[in-house]
Amino acid sequence: MSKFSFVNKNSIQNNKFFLDQDESHHLINVLRLKLGSEIWLTDGEGGTYYCKTDNFTKENIVEGHILDSYSNQNELNYHIHLGLPIIKKSRMKIAIEKSVESGIKELTPLILDRSIKSNLSMEKINSIMRSATKQSMRSVLPKTNPISELEDWYNPEALNIVASIGSVDTLTVFKDKIYKAVDSKKKISILLGPEGGFSSEEKEFIYDNKFLKVSVAKAVLRSETAVVSILSILNEVMVQYE
């Protein structure tokens, strides 16, 4: 496991830092951190710090000093906002983890007509987001929006893309539109459907608002697999842009 933890910006002064109780407990009791160990920290707002531990206090708080600092490490230079339908808890966890690892900047859980009824809490979603950010050693903790409906998630100012069963076009067909959107600093909003697919009303909304409809595989994919597929393809398309 990576020795990568969150640090509050207010806990950094004069190139020294201390961690909160939860992060300290994880490093000391789970990862068995030793004094003098080198670790990575992120403030979740774009700052990453390469550090060395100096002290464990009586309250088991990790203290240390910063050896070097970096900005936006392991971050994409474009903004992906994922609209993720609520699916079964175990699959939702996978979808959130993989989307964070794939570089999304923003996530909105969506209640669609055929979404799974779930009591998945925002607290649990935030916990998964934090864990995935640490695992992938990102500088930015993606923004998590409240659970929303499709109409509220939709952003007319963004480039809106939907993974659509039956579409014959892939993301590569629209690469010029994607590059133009990134040049214009537009968000790339990606919508996925629930296990049962979109309802006729949702399909009409997608059509009326001129979403780019793309295919991510020949087979019918589960939602959590579609997340990995469409984000991987998008990031590969963007390699040519960069």
Image (cartoon, rainbow, N blue to C red):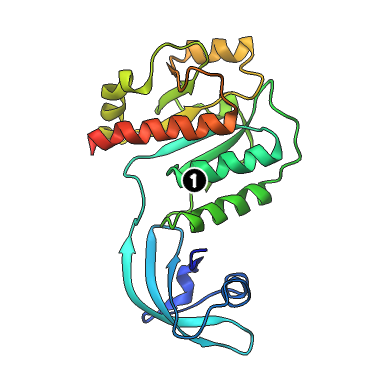
Question: Could you say where residue 79 lies in the image, as x and y percent from the top left?
Answer: 38, 39
In front here: 220 or 156?
220
In the image: residue 81, left or right of residue 28: left
Graded by Cα atoms within 10 Å as few (under 14), some (14 to 19) or many (20 or more), the crowding at tag 1 reads: many
Residue in view at x 55 percent, y 46 percent: 97
Residue in view at x 63 percent, y 76 percent: 29
What amino acid type is highlighted by mark number 1? Val
Task: Count the marks.
Answer: 1
Does 151 sit above or below residue 209? below
| Residue 145 in view, yes or no | no
Does 203 sit above or below residue 69? above
**Residue 222 occupies which quadrant of the picture?**
top right
In front here: 192 or 186?
192
Does 75 sit above or below residue 241? below
User: Residue placed farthest to the bottom in the image?
Assistant: 58
| Residue 137 in view, yes or no | yes
Question: Could you say where residue 67 lies in the image, as x and y percent from the top left?
Answer: 33, 77
Which residue is disc 1 drawn over? 100
Quadrant that contains the C terminus: top left
In front here: 29 or 60?
29
In the image: residue 50, left or right of residue 57: left
Residue in view at x 56 percent, y 50 percent: 129
Question: Could you say where residue 240 lies in the image, as x and y percent from the top left?
Answer: 24, 33
Question: Could you say where residue 66 lies in the image, as x and y percent from the top left?
Answer: 37, 77
In what element is the residue under mark 1?
A: helix
In the image: residue 38, left or right of residue 58: left
